[in-house]
Image: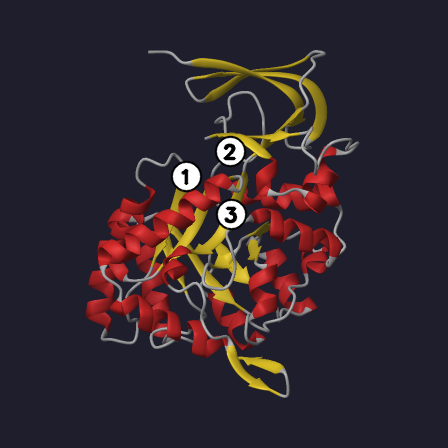
Amino acid sequence: MTTEQTVYGTIIYGPEMDIIEGCIVIRDGIIREVSEEKNNSKNIIAPCFINAHTHIGDSVLKDPKLGECIDHYVKRDLNTLVKPPYGLKHQVLNKTHHSELVEAMGHSIRDMIMTGTGAFADFREGGLQGVLALEEAVDGLGVECIKLGRPRDPSVNKEVVHREIEQVLERADGIGMSGANDTDMHILEEIRTHTKRNKRIFAIHAGENDRSDIKKALSLEPELLIHLTKAQASDLKDISAMNIPVVVCPRSNFITGAGMAPVREMLKAGIRVAIGTDNVMLNSVSMFSEMEILSKVFGLEDRQVFIMCTLMGAAVLGLNTSGSILEKNHAKLMILNGNSHNLAGVRNPISSIVRRGRPDDILSMII
């Protein structure tokens, strides 16, 4: 049975994010027509966010102690929090029952939808069982999920890791590893070989604590790099030459003390940059918060920020029919109340959404 709906308002249209007044005709979940026409709607129709890096398993630990307080300064230790296999998050995940994990992740996925996200990529710990828990949590919610699994403990013998990776790759979209300093390089190379053989995504964290793992990560020729907060100009030159996209996570890197990624320099180097919210135990899944920091703290141009949080996220994850409002694309739209107390009177919808938009401005989601 064919379903069709037409929505009116101010539309953020196409890959250039042009502003037009008009309507969108959606049939069977696909954008069939976008036309310019005068209308009385105050709504702002925008593409959904693409959250390019999450760890929603962390939903079972939303209020960890961040570190030791010394002279009113909180000393944060990233390794203590998240380094596999014995970081705090991994200790908690190993003790969490399957049903509790699924329920917690389900809350975060629903929160993503309510805050404007139409697709996300998750680095899923816990081997095959972790991937299955994510599948269960996302089932029926309509949001697209790129599942990037990993072995439960990559330090065990090679045969066990190989078997587990093959199991994960049967269900996941790829592999999402921790930094190259966290796992023996021979094992990482084997994991990369298996992933490539199965034509899946291989993604890895790099340059978060320091830059000592960046060249190692590049030697694995990943499809996606995460963080790069410690990257220098020479690293960015190499990454650009290899045409590897990067996902940065501003709030997470700030709160863990990892620093601020050189986003402006990445963009100047021609690197494709997308945005993620990272660890749920440290931050909410709201992309509005990431955009505000990128605009106000990093000083990036608002349209560029919006593109990184939508179209570029889709591009680096291979979601080629998402990320923008365009004919034949999937209809992943958020409809914002342009007459809310927060947005009433705005003259530049993109700048206003980036700098001051909030989840409560969203009237509805079409995903």
Residue shown at the point (47%, 45%) measured from the top left: 112
Q: Nearer the viewer, mark 3 or mark 2?
A: 3
Q: Are marks 3 and 2 in contact (CB under 8 Å)?
A: no
- Residue 228 in view: no
Residue that numbered label 2 is attached to: 322
Three-letter code, disc 3: Asn
Asked where in the image residue 335 lies, by quadrant, the reply is top right
Q: Nearer the viewer, residue 205 or 66?
A: 66
Residue shown at the point (45%, 71%) measured from the top left: 64
Q: CA distance from mark 1 to mark 2?
A: 10 Å
Residue 144 has which mark?
Answer: 1
Q: Residues within 10 Å of mark 2 (few under 14, many from 20)?
A: many
Tell me the element at label 3. strand
The picture places residue 262, in percent across and down from the top left corner, at 68, 63
Residue that numbered label 3 is attached to: 51
- In this rendering, position of residue 72 left or right of residue 108: right
- In this rendering, position of residue 77 left or right of residue 251: left
The picture places residue 306, in percent across and down from the top left corner, at 65, 42
Q: Nearer the viewer, residue 224 or 289?
A: 289
Three-letter code, disc 2: Ser
The picture places residue 226, in percent across and down from the top left corner, at 52, 60
Q: Residue furthest bottom?
A: 71
Three-letter code, disc 1: Glu
The picture places residue 26, in percent across and down from the top left corner, at 50, 17
Tell me the element at label 2. loop
Above or below, 313 against 277 in this view is above
Q: Are marks 1 and 2 in contact (CB under 8 Å)?
A: yes
